[in-house]
Amino acid sequence: MDPGGFQIGPATRTEVTYPFSPENLLEIIAQDTKRLAETPGLRETDATLFDRITMGMPGMIRHGVIVYTPHYIRKAGPHTRIDPTNEAAWNGLDIQAALEERFSVPALVINDSEVAAAGVVSGRGLEVVLTFGTGLGSAVVDDGILAPHMEFSHAQMRWGLTYDDVVGEIERIRLGDSAWSRRVLRAVESLYPVLRWDKLYIGGGNASRISSSVRAKFDSKVTFIPNAAGMNGGVRAWSLAGHNARRSERGQHAQLRGPDVLGDQIMPD
């Protein structure tokens, strides 16, 4: 992407093979960098091919640190058994620092739905992005400021099941698009009283599968966005989330004073 957010290099897609470690991720990025370096019209050397990295990844990312990621910690992909070794390698990892060390450029790592949000929000009012894919992704932006990430996907929706359980890819395949679309509608209706958004954007890999009859039930506050929004948001994410990308100096000082004082981009699935 150029500084204006326009795509100037070819998009690449690399399938994840499991088990999938942080080093596997860094190597994928390194290989993609080499392919981009061979693209006519772009800079010729790896060292100067890009000035910074934006990465969105699934899960709870806080100040560039992976608090919890749901898929890469598993033996054979989403909804399979957890691999304890990979769980320890991913959760708690400062992935932003790892990228900066490996590629010697500034990096910004936030949730993948938040990168998508950066590509579409207007900066006016409370804007929410919901992405439907492997599970439910979400981002909340208030007057152009990215709110701390919340995993609505892990909250209970109905029958003691989470939003991921009810509207995720496994249920879409089991139910078919029509019945699954009605669940999407119920999910959106259940979240509106919680957030009272001014604008809702619906995207993700499965958004195109939402039936026309269900789409017709949404009001004018709802807009459907292309899956490419995540790439387009790579540049804007820095202004949207830059203030929250690293733990603030104030927060660091609060930690140093003691426990009585409280302180505190597009990835393949």
Image (cartoon, rainbow, N blue to C red):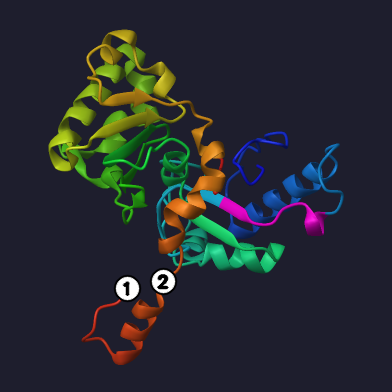
Q: Pointer 1: what residue? A: 264
Is residue 33 shown above or below 261? above
Q: Which mark is residue 163?
A: none
Residue found at x 59% / y 56%: 21
Q: Position of residue 197 (x, y in %)?
A: 22, 37
The residue closer to the viewer here, 183 or 227, is: 227
Q: Position of residue 244 (x, y in %)?
A: 40, 62
Measure the alpha-carbon separation of dots 1 and 2: 7 Å
Residue 251: which quarter of the image? Answer: bottom left
Amino acid on which disc 2 is placed: Arg
* Badge 1 element: loop
Amino acid on which disc 1 is placed: Asp
Query: Horizontally, is 126 left or right of 11 in the view?
Result: left
Q: Quick one: which residue is furthest to the bottom in this view?
A: 257
Q: Position of residue 91 (x, y in %)?
A: 44, 62
Is residue 7 shown above or below 260? above
Residue found at x 40% / y 23%: 207
The residue closer to the viewer here, 251 or 73, is: 251
Label 1 Cα crowd, 10 Å radius (few <14 / some 14-19 / many 20+): some
The residue closer to the viewer here, 254 or 89, is: 254
Check contact, mark 1 vs mark 2: CB within 8 A.
yes
Query: Horizontally, is 70 left or right of 219 in the view?
Result: right
Q: Quick one: which residue is furthest to the top in this view?
A: 213
Which image quadrant: the N terminus?
top right
Q: Which residues are magenta?
A: 46-54
Q: Is residue 183 magenta?
A: no
Residue found at x 41% / y 71%: 247
> Between disc 1 and disc 2, whose residue precedes?
2
Q: Pointer 2: what residue? A: 247
Q: Position of residue 116 (x, y in %)?
A: 46, 39
